[in-house]
Image: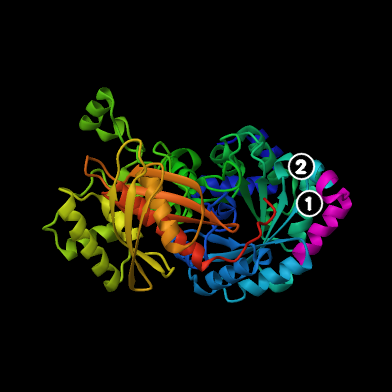
């Protein structure tokens, strides 16, 4: 219990917060911005169907608020936000807007179908932004912020305001801005560490200052939005919660501008695992963390490092003899979380060529894939083909087969097969076979610096599209000499950049499938999108 002297010095808001924390776990809202800030990661842009798929996964995950995009940025962003707003049930759908009438009205137009709409307006407040970007005085910034919140409040009741670069804003001015926007109708006040400059001690001090000094702070939820430039985004977010924040803004796998954002899976599991310390809770269904992480990684093409906390392949792996001995005696000696709590199985369930459709469907569901009967049939057929190639089928193999079913893009060119003759020091001879709009087509060339280059050149000749290969990555999906290889490519043509992915026990076939997938996307094309200003 705090001393009488300490209680006497605490503000009314701080006392209310302390009382809430002492009674039961304090609920923390999870605000996911994967579809907005996460998409600002270079090369991570998503089409409308992919965004909707992620949004639905976030609802199943238990996310409280989904920031669906920046509606005024482009027609594509507007359409995505509007479709997500119409489709999502059970979570608040949020749209970003600058403190301008056009931005705010456009955001509301996109959000009108939402069951629970929120308009998120922002304006920079730090001295460096006021002087060099906005060229505005403190009073002008204050007036613009109030005007933006006032206009947004005319459209809906749930309004969030962010003083951009709040972590570098003078605390006296920050307190003035926060008080003013709450009085104007803001129901959530977000404190962004826009450039990842803050430290946990500093972030705690900023949030505590708002709790202690802003008289109407109890009328709004304090939020935090931390970037990871110094690797402190999760630590800063947790420090903000300790000081009184009730909402954390984060992304799946921590993706986002520059070094990324606070990782949802890390901050949620920190609050859960150390509930004895933070005494807070979230609505997140943690066994869905790994499936959601995989979904976002596959759609964006941004792979999860093996040593990534919570969702990395090595997060629950033990090689040290001492660690293995301890795990066998008592798992808690070296694991502070259970793998199943985040959606991982302790061991892979191995299926084989004698396994049936029901076993495959059950395993796919356990891995987070809801397959239609038609999709299940396609996966089952490919599973049988794969089982004839491999002795054992692992979870990673099944996940790779399932993920191929979630592309909305029609394929003009469908891979059929290849033959290749190659020797060291000579250009390979490649014959590639595809179906073009259902009709068989093939090409044979002798060119390239090795088999992969030869296959790529054959595809260019067959499709008639010359591309620049910006990225080419190969990794094993599972373990063993007969493991499936996964190839991810990023191709550029006429200013467009598209990704493609292919999986096969034959790495050259995987490369051909990846190259064709990206080429099909380039043929279809995508509307250009503008990136919003950063929080």
Residue 292 at least partly seen: no
Secondary structure under tag 2 reads: loop
Give the vertical position of 196 relative to 223 (above or below). above
Q: Nearer the viewer, residue 421 or 123?
A: 421
Residue 169 badge: 2
Residue visible at 42% across and 44% down?
473
**Residues drawn in magenta:** 131-150
Q: Nearer the viewer, residue 222 or 78?
A: 78
Residue visible at 74% across and 39% down?
168
Which residue is situated farthest in the bottom direction here? 113
Residue 177 badge: 1
In front: label 2 or label 1? 2
Which residue is situated farthest in the left direction here? 354
Question: Residue 25 appears at what percent x and percent y?
Answer: 48, 49
**149 in magenta:** yes
Location of the N terminus (image quadrant) = top right
**217 in magenta:** no
Residue visible at 56% across and 68% down?
80
* Quadrant housing residue 158: bottom right
Residue 481 badge: none
Q: Earlier in the sequence, mark 2 or mark 1?
A: 2
Using residue 126 as the reference point, say whether residue 405 is left or right of it. Answer: left
* CB within 8 Å, label 2 to label 1: yes
Give the vertical position of 469 relative to 327 (above or below). below
Q: Nearer the viewer, residue 387 or 494?
A: 494
Marks 2 and 1 sit apart, C-alpha to C-alpha, by: 10 Å
């Amino acid at each position: 219990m705090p001393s009488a002297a300490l209680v006497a010095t605490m503000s009314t808001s701080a006392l209310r917060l302390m009382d809430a924390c002492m009674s039961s776990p304090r609920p923390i809202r999870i605000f996911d911005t994967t579809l907005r800030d996460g998409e600002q990661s270079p090369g991570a842009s998503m089409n409308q169907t992919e965004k909707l798929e992620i949004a639905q996964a976030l609802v199943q995950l238990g996310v409280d608020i989904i920031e669906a995009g920046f509606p005024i940025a482009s027609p594509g962003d507007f359409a995505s936000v509007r479709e997500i707003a119409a489709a999502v049930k059970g979570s608040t759908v949020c749209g970003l807007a600058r403190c301008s009438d056009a931005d705010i009205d456009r955001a509301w137009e996109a959000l009108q179908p939402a069951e629970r709409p929120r308009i998120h307006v922002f304006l920079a407040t730090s001295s460096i932004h006021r002087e060099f970007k906005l060229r505005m005085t403190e009073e002008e910034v204050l007036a613009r912020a109030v005007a933006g919140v006032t206009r947004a409040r005319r459209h809906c009741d749930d309004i969030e305001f962010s003083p951009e670069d709040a972590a570098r804003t003078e605390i006296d001015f920050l307190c003035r801005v926060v008080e003013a926007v709450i009085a104007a109708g803001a129901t959530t006040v977000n404190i962004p560490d826009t450039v990842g400059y803050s430290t946990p001690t500093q972030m705690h001090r900023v949030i505590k200052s708002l709790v202690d000094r802003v008289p109407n702070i109890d009328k709004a939820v304090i939020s935090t939005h931390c970037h990871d430039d110094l690797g402190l985004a999760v630590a800063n977010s947790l420090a903000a919660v300790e000081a009184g924040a009730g909402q954390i803004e984060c992304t799946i796998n921590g993706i986002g501008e520059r070094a990324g954002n606070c990782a949802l899976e890390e901050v949620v599991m920190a609050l859960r695992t150390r509930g004895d310390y933070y005494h807070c809770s979230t609505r997140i269904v943690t066994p869905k963390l790994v499936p959601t992480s995989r979904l976002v990684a596959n759609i964006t093409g941004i792979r999860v490092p093996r040593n990534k906390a919570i969702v990395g392949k090595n997060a629950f792996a033990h090689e040290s003899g001492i660690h293995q001995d301890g795990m066998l005696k008592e798992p808690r000696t070296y694991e502070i979380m259970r793998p199943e709590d985040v959606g991982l199985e302790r061991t892979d369930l191995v299926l084989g060529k004698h396994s049936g459709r029901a076993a495959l469907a059950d395993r796919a569901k356990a891995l987070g894939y809801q397959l239609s009967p038609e999709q299940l049939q396609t996966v089952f057929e490919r599973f049988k083909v794969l089982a004839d190639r491999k002795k054992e089928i692992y979870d990673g193999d099944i996940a790779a087969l399932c993920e191929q079913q979630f592309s909305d893009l029609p394929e003009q060119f469908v891979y059929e097969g290849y033959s290749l003759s190659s020797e060291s020091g000579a250009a390979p001879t490649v014959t590639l076979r595809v179906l073009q709009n259902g009709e068989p087509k093939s090409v044979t060339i002798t060119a390239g610096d090795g088999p992969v280059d030869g296959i790529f050149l054959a595809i260019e000749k067959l499709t008639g599209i010359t591309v620049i290969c910006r990225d080419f990555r190969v990794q094993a999906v599972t373990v063993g000499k007969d493991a499936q290889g996964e190839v991810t490519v990023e191709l550029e043509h006429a200013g467009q950049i598209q990704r493609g992915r292919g999986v096969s026990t034959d790495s050259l076939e995987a490369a051909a499938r990846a190259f064709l997938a990206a080429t099909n996307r380039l043929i279809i094309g995508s509307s250009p999108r503008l990136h919003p200003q950063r929080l």
